[in-house]
Every structure is written in C-alpha cells, then in structure tokens.
Image (cartoon, rainbow, N blue to C red):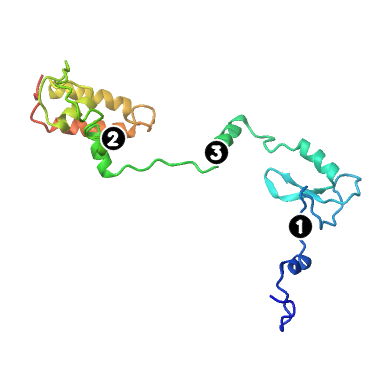
Amino acid sequence: MRKNDPFGFDMSVSSAKKKNPRGRRGMSGASETSQRVCEHDKCQEHAKFRAPKSPDVMDDYFWFCQEHVREYNLKWNFFDGTSEAELMAQQAKDRVWERPTKPFKKSEEEIAWARLGVDDPHQVLGGNATQNPGRNPNAGNTRRLPPTERRAVEVLEAKDTMSKPQIRKQYKALIKVLHPDMNGGDRSQEEQLAEVVWAWEQIKSSKHFREKD
C-alpha cells in the first residue's frame, strides 16, 4: 500500500519491523534488540543469547552474553537424570519421528482367506500357478477332504487318519500353549488361538472323521 494512503496507514514490511522489532535475530542467533544484562554471576555484558533453563522447561530461558552462553551450552545435557531404559525408549521414538506406525486391521475377507492358508487373495494360485507340480505325497495326509477341513487338520497339527478324540487331544494341547489364562497371561498369540478354535469347530462338525478311536 502506498505511504500516502488517505487513511494514514503504512502496511509495508519495513514499517512493521520498526514498530515491532521483537524477535529479530542475526545469523549467530543473537537477539539484536535485547536490552537484558547477562544472568551469569557478576557479569554486566549485554545478554543477546538465550538458553533453555532445563529439558522440562524448553520455553523458559536464561539470557547470557556470548562468552557465558558458550560455557552454559558446553555443560548442557538434555538427557541428564534419564535412566538407560528411558534413553532407549526415546531413541526408538526418534527413529520414527515420534510417529510410530500401526498395523492395518485385517478385513473379514482377509481373515477368511487366512483361515485357508492364503495371506493375499491375489496369490490364491501361488508362485507356480502356471506349473503342474503333480500330486504332493504327504505321509500324514492320505484322504481327500474339503479345503476347510484340510486346513483345519494342518492348523491343529494333526493327521487326517486320526479320530475326533485324537484330534481333540491335539486341540487341547494347543489351547494350553496359546490361551492367556493358561500360559501366564501372554496375549501375543490370540490370533493363532482364534484360528485353532475355528479349526476344531470344522473337525467337530465334520462327517469325515471317526467319532471313536
């Protein structure tokens, strides 16, 4: 806006700096407009340099002359009084700029595919989709079962020649390892636990396994 504005306003940047010089700093970090006196004991030099008072109070400052701010900075330790565990935790946060990523929650469709042993629906045919590997001889699998029941047998680490009571023993053994109430409260394997429960439900209602040994 022109300086001869009829309303008497001067909106130029230089005018604003003259009226409000607060915060003007040189390349060295010195506050050019500071009129303070150095807070170091018995020092009467101009205090143009600021330094935070403590790691917990980063917006409150001491004001020093150049000589004493250098002396203060040499003694400054942001992690003074921090335990090793707290230091390691802070380093872990700094690696991701204190913005840790969270895993995506699986959709119902992805969970359904996972029960059949497929992590990605687009990989249903696997890496050898154009090849015919032939029959895969497996000493523990000698019968033809529906895909869900075949997957259930694998999850329970059983064989398709076992009876339901035998597979149930396998199921109980896995529950003891995976259930938080039986393994000391460890909840890291709850997803696998849910898969084991699902697998037993498939076998329990199946007509392809003997009811007795």
Q: Is residue 187 left or right of residue 112?
A: right
Q: Amino acid at mark 2?
A: Asp
Q: Secondary structure at mark 2?
A: loop
Q: Position of residue 203 (x, y in %)?
A: 15, 30
Q: Residues within 10 Å of mark 3 (few under 14, many from 20)?
A: few
Q: Disc 3 on helix, strand or loop?
A: helix
Assign the N terminus to one quadrant of the image: bottom right
Measuring from the top left, give residue 36's x and y in whole percent. 85, 55
Residue at point 74%, 46% (across, down): 53
* Residue located farthest toward the bottom when viewing the structure as drawn: 6
Q: Nearer the viewer, mark 3 or mark 1?
A: 1
Amino acid at the residue labelled 1: Arg
* Point 35% across, 43% down: residue: 105
Mark before the other along the chain sequence, 3 or 1: 1
Separation of residues labelled 3 and 1 (CA atoms): 33 Å
Q: Are marks 2 and 1 in contact (CB under 8 Å)?
A: no
Above-or-below relation of 147 to 47: above
Task: Return the residue at label 1.
Answer: 24
Q: For mark 2, does the 10 Å Cα neighbourhood hold few (<14), some (14 to 19), or many (20 or more) residues?
A: some
